[in-house]
Amino acid sequence: MDDASGPQAKFRAMEEGTAEDWAAIAGAFGPFAAALPDRVLTHLRLLDGDYGGFPIDRLQHSLQTATRAHRDGRDEEYVVMALLHDIGDTLGSYNHPDIAAAILAPFLSEENHWIVAKHGIFQGYYFFHHLGLDRDMREQFRDHKYFAACQEFCEKYDQAAFDPDYASEPLDFFEPMLRRVMAAPKRSIYAEALE
């Protein structure tokens, strides 16, 4: 069965799949995966105008965080992690770091992935006590090898990125970086299978 997008698998349950079916699926994966940066950028733009009570909207916070990291000389992977660290806010209101970490997992080093996955707890140092929570919740990770790196990300870039007067770079400045980082997965069972 062919349609406008090319051959399709013929099975009704995966246990019926053939090598031909999976070749069709693998053939469709490449173009779909190549469009991932477009989907991520579209989703990131959903943060535009979403203030959630903050002094700037969530997109501006993301741009400001990434701009601060870029101007501090961080590499592209780190800057993209900074740009996307809160992308989970729209669908993961109660666990946004987990969403960002899942999206970025194939493209980040172990250290940068740990930072994005744990930044919510580390960021809590700056405000949890105002909500009746333990601001030192991050201390549970004190002995982790990436504790200092996550602490630094929050201190230098994330918690400081709510300044309405800060001149951030626009999203199109970061787009080529995002495309380069997301074009080269570091780890994924699917990427390995398609090499």
Image (cartoon, rainbow, N blue to C red):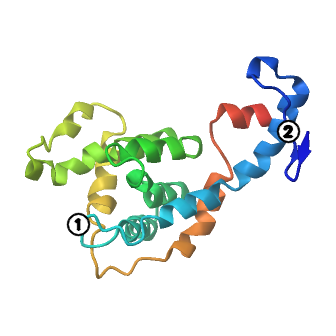
Observer able to see residue 115: no
Number of the label disc, if any, that sits on residue 8:
2
- Please state if 46 lies on the left or on the right of 194 as rendered: left
- Please name whichever residue, 152 or 59, is drawn nearer the observer in this view of the structure: 59
- At mark 2, the secondary structure is loop
State the image quarter where residue 181 is shown.
bottom right
Please state which of the two labelled residues, at mark 1 or mark 2, is closer to the viewer: 2
Q: Residues within 10 Å of mark 1 (few under 14, many from 20)?
A: few
Residue at image point 16% right, 53% down? 127
Which amino acid type is shown beneath numbered disc 2?
A: Gln
Which residue is at 87% across, 53% downward?
A: 4
Q: Position of residue 80 (x, y in %)?
A: 51, 58
Q: Nearer the viewer, residue 31 or 176?
A: 31
Residue 88 shown left or right of residue 38 in the figure: left
Residue 54 position, x and y percent, is: 24, 67
Q: Position of residue 164 (x, y in %)?
A: 28, 78
Q: Is residue 23 above or below residue 173?
A: above
Q: Report the amino acid beneath label 1.
A: Gly
In the rendered structure, find residue 53 and report the number of the disc placed on it.
1
Q: Residue furthest top?
A: 15
Residue at 26%, 43% in the rendered image = 121
Under tag 1, what secondary structure? loop
Q: Quick check: 22 left or right of 100?
A: right
Q: How many marks?
A: 2
Q: Mark 2 or mark 1, which is nearer the start of the sequence?
A: 2
| Marks 1/2: CA–CA distance | 47 Å
